[in-house]
């Protein structure tokens, strides 16, 4: 007989927070914590193995952040829902995570009732956002979605690398680099690579 419980994977680099949330969910008859991860790469591997209904995802983590982990999990498991649990309600990373496929985002200091309600709602396919996160989203345009390669190329441009150097770095042709740069400029509304970098940094799409 198939279990009716919502299978949850908790992803946060702070073990104490993971354990606290897991302990909270243990007492809910319709919820089941099937795994925990402390970074994005581990989250992707566990998600593939466990196929959870919902991933509760932190944003700022070592090895791989929650945005990229969300993108890859949603690409591989489109029926798995992602709820962002964050300390930074105004962080641009929240908008990036939503663009990557997250269906909800709430603050870590939200009440137990709010957290449980959000978990159940997002697992059911609904979108849920804390008021402060919703305000930030309303005030900030949704960032463009880049492929992993486009982000890599853009990051290399910030390091002062030319097309040939970038091509050698990733084992692709210079024409491919140009195509990636053209796509990046189009998505950012930039007229050249320097302007693209400036816009990306200003909108916190890159870390330097």
Image (cartoon, rainbow, N blue to C red):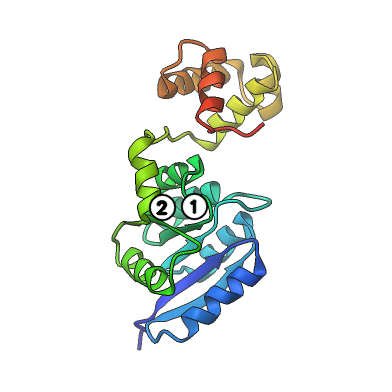
Image quadrant in which you'd find residue 83: bottom left
Which residue is found at the position 50% from the left and 19% from the top?
A: 179
Where disc 2 sits, the SS reads loop
**First-in-chain label (2 vs 1):** 1
Residue with the most extreme top position: 191
Which residue is found at the position 64% from the left and 63% from the top?
A: 38
The image shows residue 53 at horizontal and vertical percentages of 40, 68
Q: Quadrant of the N terminus?
A: bottom left
The image shows residue 136 at horizontal and vertical percentages of 39, 42
What label does residue 173 carry, if any? none
Q: Is residue 129 left or right of residue 71?
A: left
Which residue is found at the position 63% from the left and 58% from the top?
A: 39
How crowded pointer 2 is (Cα within 10 Å; few <14, some 14-19, many 20+) is rated as many
Which residue is found at the position 35% from the left and 48% from the top?
A: 134
Q: In the rendered picture of this protein, how many numbered marks are placed on residues?
A: 2
What label does residue 102 carry, if any? 2
What label does residue 70 carry, if any? 1
Examine the rendered structure and indicate whether residue 173 appears above or below residue 141.
above
């Amino acid at each position: 007989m198939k279990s009716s419980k919502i299978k949850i994977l908790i992803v946060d680099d702070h073990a104490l927070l993971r354990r606290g949330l897991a302990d909270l969910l243990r007492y809910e008859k319709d919820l089941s914590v099937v795994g925990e991860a402390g970074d994005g790469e581990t989250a992707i591997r566990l998600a593939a193995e466990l196929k959870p209904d919902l991933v509760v995802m932190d944003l700022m983590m070592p090895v791989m952040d929650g945005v990229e982990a969300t993108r890859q999990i949603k690409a591989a498991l489109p029926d798995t829902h992602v709820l962002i649990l964050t300390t930074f309600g105004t962080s641009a990373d929240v908008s990036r995570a939503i663009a990557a496929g997250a269906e909800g985002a709430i603050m870590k200091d939200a009440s137990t009732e709010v957290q449980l309600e959000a978990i159940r709602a997002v697992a059911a396919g609904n979108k849920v956002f804390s008021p402060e996160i919703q305000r930030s989203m309303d005030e900030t345009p949704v960032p463009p979605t880049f492929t992993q390669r486009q982000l890599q190329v853009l990051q290399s441009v910030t390091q002062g690398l030319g097309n040939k150097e970038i091509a050698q770095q990733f084992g692709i042709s210079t024409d491919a680099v140009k195509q990636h740069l053209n796509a990046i400029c189009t998505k950012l509304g930039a007229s050249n690579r320097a302007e693209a970098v400036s816009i990306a940094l200003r909108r916190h799409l890159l870390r330097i």
